[in-house]
Image (cartoon, helix red, strand yellow):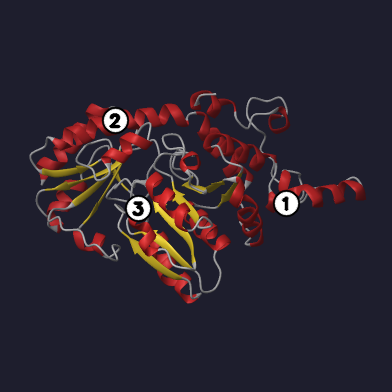
Amino acid sequence: MKDETKIINSGRNIQFTHRAINPIVQRTSSIIFNSIAQKKHAAKNYKNGELFYGRYGTLSHFSLQKSMIELENGSGCMLFPCGTAAITHTIFAFITYGDHILITESAYAPTQNFCRFLLNKMNVHTTWFHSSISNNITNLIQHNTKLIILESPGSITMEVQDIPTLIQATRKKKPDIIILLDNTWSSGVFLKALDIGVDISIQSGTKYIIGHSDGMMGTAVSNARCWNTLQEQSYLMGQTIDADTAYIAARGLRTLYVRLKQHEKTGLHLAQWLNNHPKVDRVNHPALPSCQGHKYFIRDFTGSSGLFSFILKKRLTDKQLSNFLDNMKYFKMAYSWGGFESLITTMQIEELNSIRPINKLNFTGTLIRIHAGLEHQEDLIQDLSDGLNRI
């Protein structure tokens, strides 16, 4: 099946829908057993989707997990209460005292802080690497390196990594290293991470999967090699989501492809318009040649989402930032992204450099991050134009 068809049909077996269109919402903490034999059977098979106890999942959860497995071509899927939980608990599942991990310095700041502060207390050592690294990743691998953590495109500055080359070099030197990818930007649609050698594809389902800014969830889709460990360790750490969140995530999935294509269309239109604006120095959009790693984007991705950033030629004062942002009509100031609404945030270079451990950025203007929503693109351009004029 093509993704458009797969997204519509996955996880809608009759066992999950009970002959309705959508999977049922099964809210329960306890599962009732009619016999000792049934209870023993459930205890033996709960890892294979047998109803056992609410924390291990209900039909609402099993339906969503099956959909994510089919979408990302995985062997198993764990659900978490947010994207950060999906990242941190997946890392926890595979490390032990004294291990070493590698992480791209363009990763999401909470992921970096988790490595910097919590893992450090457990004597797990972290080495950061530049997002442009490929074959040279082997120079950083130590005898106790357990994990490599990738994010492509990179958070905020949108660098695309040479993932296949990096993986090939890693496997050649140390085959047992686990490779994780924060794949939220592509939503598992525009980049099939497991197909190119990633072990576990992680998403903040809060973003495009739910798609309506009304829930929080994380997913981790694993290949066969890592699935048993991820599943068992996540169960031990008590990770779960409620049935209603599983339901709205499954509902969001049904329109994921068409929403992503519209986000892509609008995002590209805005990026190209900004690329020609006299006040803009550079646009960081993976589909534009000016973005670092553009050639890898063309090779590995089949499309782009609505998140990108651009850098103004001049650094804005606090007053100019207020003039620019306080009176936007359609773009709203908020954290997160991936919903139906357009969002905008800003960062100065010192804020970005505070989360760049090894290679400091060197631009002089103010960075603006855009999430292109589902509004009409000309309305959004007018809003940006008016804002830039107010500077």
Q: Secondary structure at mark 3?
A: helix
Nearest to the observer: residue 315 or residue 132? 132
Between disc 1 and disc 2, whose residue precedes? 1
Q: Nearer the viewer, mark 3 or mark 1?
A: 3
Name the residue rendered at 38%, 31% in the picture: 302
Q: Could you say where residue 182 lies in the image, as x and y percent from the top left? A: 43, 49
**Mark 1 Cα within 10 Å, few/some/many (few <14, many 20+)?**
few
Judging by the rendered image, the residue that carries numbered circle 3 is 135
Please state if 361 lies on the left or on the right of 332 as rendered.
left
Q: Which of the pair 174/36 is nearer the observer?
A: 174
Q: Is residue 241 visible?
A: no
Which residue corresponds to the image point at 72% horizontal and 43% vertical from the top-left? 49
Mark 2 residue type: Thr
Residue 110 percent location from the top left of the image: 40, 60
- Which badge, 3 or 2, is on the more N-terminal residue? 3
Q: Report how far apart the C-alphas of labels 3 and 2 lie in the structure.
A: 35 Å
Residue 29's tag is 1
